[in-house]
Amino acid sequence: MKSKALRLIALAAIAATALVGCAQNTGDAGSGQQPGAAGQPCDRTVANDVTLPTDKPSGPTDGFTVAMVRQSGVGDYFEQWGNGATKQIKAAGGQVDVYDARGDNARQVAQFNDAISARPDVIIVDHGLADSVNPKIDEAISNGIPVVVYDVNIANCEAMYISQDDTSIATEILDYLKQENPDGGKIAYVNVSGIAPLDSRDAVYQQFLKDNPQFTQVAHFGKYSESVASDTATEGAAALKASPDTTLAFAAYDELAKGTLIALRQNNMSDKVKVYGVDISTADIQLMTEPGSPWRATAATDPANVGAIVARAAIAAASGVDMPEKMTIPAALITQDMLREQGVTNMDELRAALPDLATPELLGAPWIPQVQPGV
């Protein structure tokens, strides 16, 4: 038991400096701005059935350049996302220049300035603070550079916004929680507020409690920081000690789930509480499948596939295709039972076992050679 706990804490430390795979909703970026400018989010229309032109557009589809302005962290989620995007761009004949701030918001602004000055054919924004990047997105668009954004609470309606379908993600995992526990249970809720995707998942969870009174929330914890898993574990250990009757835990993304696992171990509750989470990575798979793991299921997209989708959107935008304002990517349910039964130990094996993670129909076109996700 001690060695398992030490290994779990070590995994959490590796992932602790990773940024959450979600956008921070930090509110208005300034005052006196027009609707659709930085800090004034527009009412976006979701269009998931976009069909790209069959014929190759006249824009720069060969030798085009993509600037990828990132706010990544340690962990295989970000590595897979970046590799998926880069492989897709190169397969289509493009060059990608990566500007990665690695958690430094001031550095991301400076790098965004460098990206704009380089005059790429398109800019991809992958994570970051809304207050930091929204003015730069406006500047890029005003300079005639199309922008595709993933998981940042952006304002400018001329930038395309891509995210996971957070409502369906939360619905899918909570439906499975109910399926496994039809008589109800006492839930430890692990989430933080003020982060756009997590707020969307929270709305689904709150409605779930109203619709299913056999489930009762008895604890609430979760910490958003540069050390999400370890800080959440610290909060969770105290919250769970005060709520020893907890039988279930719902963690709104995987770093929070990792912190929950540590807190359960510290309270000797791993055999009493079932954990349900969101997101997936090789590290998550290992934690879900180890002997005695309470992590029963997660709802997730494939980060490498998501990166490739964002890249295809950028390729189309660089080619002059009129892109929709918003697109959401559906998730798949991944259970502990399935992982164990099929001997899945990493993301590549998961992709083979669960083809639904691949979505080649999203922004596919004959002139954009698709790549197989994977690191």
Image (spheres, grey):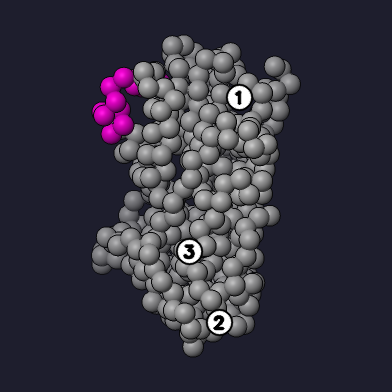
Residue 361 numbered tag: 3
Q: Can you say which quadrant of the picture contains the C terminus?
A: bottom right
Q: Secondary structure at mark 3?
A: loop
Q: 195 above or below 251?
A: below
Q: Nearer the viewer, residue 225 or 198?
A: 198
Q: Secondary structure at mark 1?
A: loop
Q: Label 2 sits on what residue type?
A: Thr
Instruction: Give the quadrant of residue 217.
Output: top left
Alpha carbons under labels 2 and 3: distance apart: 20 Å
- Crowd around label 1: few <14 · some 14–19 · many ≥20 (10 Å): some
Q: 41 above or below 242?
A: below
Q: 25 above or below 216?
A: below
Label 1: which residue? Answer: 293
Which range of residues does the magenta coloring cover?
207-219
Magenta stretch contains residue 142: no
Residue 61 numbered tag: 2
Q: Could you tell which of marks 1 and 2 lies nearer the N-terminus? A: 2
Q: Nearer the viewer, residue 3 or 138?
A: 3
Could you say where residue 133 lies in the image, as x and y percent from the top left? 45, 61
Q: Label 3 sits on what residue type?
A: Glu
